[in-house]
Image: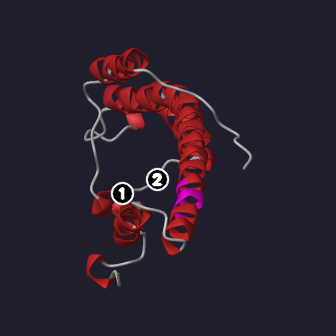
Amino acid sequence: MENKISVTINAETTKVILDAIKTIEDNLPFLINLSVEDRKNLPKMGDKTVAFVTKALEYSKQNKDVVPSFLDVAEFEKDVDVVTNLSRVLVPLHQLAEKIDDTTMLGGSEAYTAALVFYSAVKGAAKAGVPGMKTIYNELQARFPGRSKGSANS
């Protein structure tokens, strides 16, 4: 078996990382969670609309006489600023989350593969009558993914 990842993350390192995440959250107390319905219904500002939004803000500040009374330009500017600043943070966080996800997936794959190899060895040992292996095999078989707890036949 090729082992592509071989690391240990100790409790201290985990605590430092979790504290850093907490610090980020503490510095962004205004963050919200949208419902699935909200996400679906909101107009979206993407790469193609950034220039439009930025120009509209610029022109609204220069042409106050045509700004509708119900449009708060200061709040409009705050919204543009928060998107700009959070976007600068979001990209590296997405990249980091992708690396963490990929590393977790690889580590999980290697662990699952090792478990399957061991399970196969225990199964063979149980069939060969090696003492104590039947018990281990039965317990692992009952927990084997895709099997219901009541379907173990031994």
Q: Residue at x 52, y 40 (%)?
A: 53
Q: CA distance from mark 1 to mark 2?
A: 9 Å
Please name the residue that numbered disc 2 is placed on. 44
Q: Is residue 151 above or below residue 140?
A: below
Name the quadrant containing residue 74.
Answer: top left
Q: Is residue 54 above or below residue 8?
A: below
- Residue, far right: 2
In the rendered image, residue 126, in percent from the top left (x then y), is placed at: 48, 69
Q: From the viewer's perspective, is 49 left or right of 67?
A: right
Name the element at disc 1.
helix
In the rendered image, residue 151, in percent from the top left (x then y), is placed at: 32, 84
Count all numbered tags in the image, as a single digit: 2
Q: Main secondary structure of the magenta part?
A: helix
In the rendered image, residue 48, in percent from the top left (x then y), is placed at: 63, 48
Seen from the viewer's position, the closer of residues 81 and 72 is 81
Question: Hey, what amino acid is under mark 2?
Answer: Lys
Name the element at disc 2.
loop
Residue 39, label in figure: 1
Residue 129, label in figure: none
Span of residues in magenta: 115-119
Q: Residue at x 41, y 28 (%)?
A: 82
Seen from the viewer's position, the closer of residues 28 and 45 is 28
